[in-house]
Amino acid sequence: MAQKVLIVYAHQSPCSFSAGAKDAAVEVLKAKGCEVTVSDLYDMKFKATATAEDIIGEVKNAEHFRYAQETKLAWEEGRLSSDITEEQRKVTEADLIIFQFPMYWFSVPAIMKGWIDRVLTPGFAYSQEKRYSQGMFKDKKAMLSFTTGSHEPMFSANGIHGDINVSLWPLQNGILHYCGFQVLAPQIFWAPSSQTPEARKSMLDDWCTRLDKLMGEEPLSFPPLDYFDEKHFQLKPDVAEKFASQEFGPALGVHLGKPLPHNSQVKAGV
Amino acid sequence: MAQKVLIVYAHQSPCSFSAGAKDAAVEVLKAKGCEVTVSDLYDMKFKATATAEDIIGEVKNAEHFRYAQETKLAWEEGRLSSDITEEQRKVTEADLIIFQFPMYWFSVPAIMKGWIDRVLTPGFAYSQEKRYSQGMFKDKKAMLSFTTGSHEPMFSANGIHGDINVSLWPLQNGILHYCGFQVLAPQIFWAPSSQTPEARKSMLDDWCTRLDKLMGEEPLSFPPLDYFDEKHFQLKPDVAEKFASQEFGPALGVHLGKPLPHNSQVKAGV
């Protein structure tokens, strides 16, 4: 059966490098027989803000509106607004989601954060029991593909912006892996606007080469849910003991006061 | 002269704990003689998405629209949309900015990310030369004040979400400190919705106590700009050498492969 890919794409201009990266993904993946859907957020004028308008009909508690509780209920009752429901349908069908964006302020642009805040509702994307390695989307893959304004060395462990692995942790662990996705290594296009046209073309060529075998890639490594106790979600004593004598902790965020595992957020198998 | 405080506030409900934290800040700071302004983003229906509509008149390159370049030019020429200009005026006047929000997906809600993406334009908030400790806003203070859904231990270095210090780095270093702000320790309200009314009241009381002396607090520590060379923005060899024999690197992100300094993103003086 054909693999289905959803590209959640956020750039204002069809002439941008980000658009080129998105177009390359569409082309290569379609040529491989994948069904590819693009959510072009700016073109869709995708609503970014989490409001009561995201719920059709009456909210449960208008006086004290709580977005998570209200959208969980609305999801259960099929009363989420049609733009959210449509994106949730695309997520449900997808085997792989690629988030293609220019990095804004060490993170995704607001319009893409809006997609995350509004589409990944409780009930649909996670529950208390279904998170991380036991998450809703554990049979799906997801990845970040983004451009930066800064050159790679600035995002190193002795560069001015600090280690890119640190800045990727909240996005890759806190959003993608939280929902269970197997997180593929990010595709980082370092400062394309500072490169020559030839270098930009070469970056896209490398991306096409990677796309050809993307679906078979090993995902990044995150600690399995059963490393943590079910009450306080702390590393179980026997697991902590196992790592006590090791060089690194189980993950970048779950570091146990040890040095961070090198490149754990940008390379598989580390 | 009265100190001026801007509270950038993002919650949909005036009955929320976040609203209570915002109201407490307004009350305590006004009682101390501060001038307090609140930007209530949901109430203002603040536009979150970065589009060409943010520029009045013609954009320089409509065919290949680049948000950063276009808004930098528009800022220089006084052609940013009035909602952005108004927020920039508030920032210019403020001595302290408090960002009050519920944490959404390990970060700020999209509407607040939109404020960051749109208001902190190049030229106004930073330039190649004026960043970090030499940043535009180095005479101002800023801080995050937020609620979580999870309990504190889950955000520890052996908790399931990983060390909160890691998740705060991109926000505090990459946005606030990047613009030069002296970053005050974050005010973290751990899982107020899981607490008793008495515990919630106690959390707000603690916040009021802190607010009383907030303006005199020592900020968090970040490495000064002159630790880095001006060409590739790498730690200068003599500085790297100085840290080689130390337990920790100069900052959480600039960790040099060493263990992370404990609580450097949540406490001053570490």
Image (tube, coloured by chain):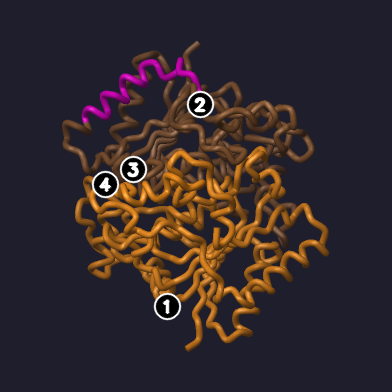
Chain colours: A orange, B brown
Q: Is residue B147 left or right of residue B58?
A: left
Cα separation between marks 1 and 2: 45 Å
Badge 2 and badge 3 in a common chain:
yes
**Disc number for residue B148:** 3
Task: Give me the residue at 55% from left, 62% from top.
Answer: A269
Q: Which residue is mark 2?
A: B220
Q: Which residue is mark 1?
A: A93
Dot 3 falls on which chain?
A: B
Q: Residue furthest top?
A: B1
Name the residue type under label 4: His
Circles 1, 3 touching at the beta carbon (< 8 Å)? no
Cα separation between marks 1 and 4: 34 Å
Q: Check if residue B214 falls in the magenta segment.
A: yes
Q: Is residue A265 left or right of residue B206?
A: right
Residue B86: image location, x then y, percent: 54, 35
Name the residue type under label 2: Leu
- Say which element carries label 3: loop
- Say which element carries label 2: loop
Residue B59: image location, x then y, percent: 70, 52
Q: Which residue is mark 4?
A: A232
Q: Residue furthest bottom?
A: A1
Cα separation between marks 1 and 3: 31 Å
Residue B233: image location, x then y, percent: 72, 38
Cα separation between marks 3 and 4: 15 Å
Say which of marks 2 and 4 sits in front.
4
In this view, A59 is above or below B173: below
Name the residue type under label 3: Thr
Residue A126 visible in this rendered orientation of the protein: yes
- Say which element carries label 1: helix
In this view, B48 is above or below B123: below
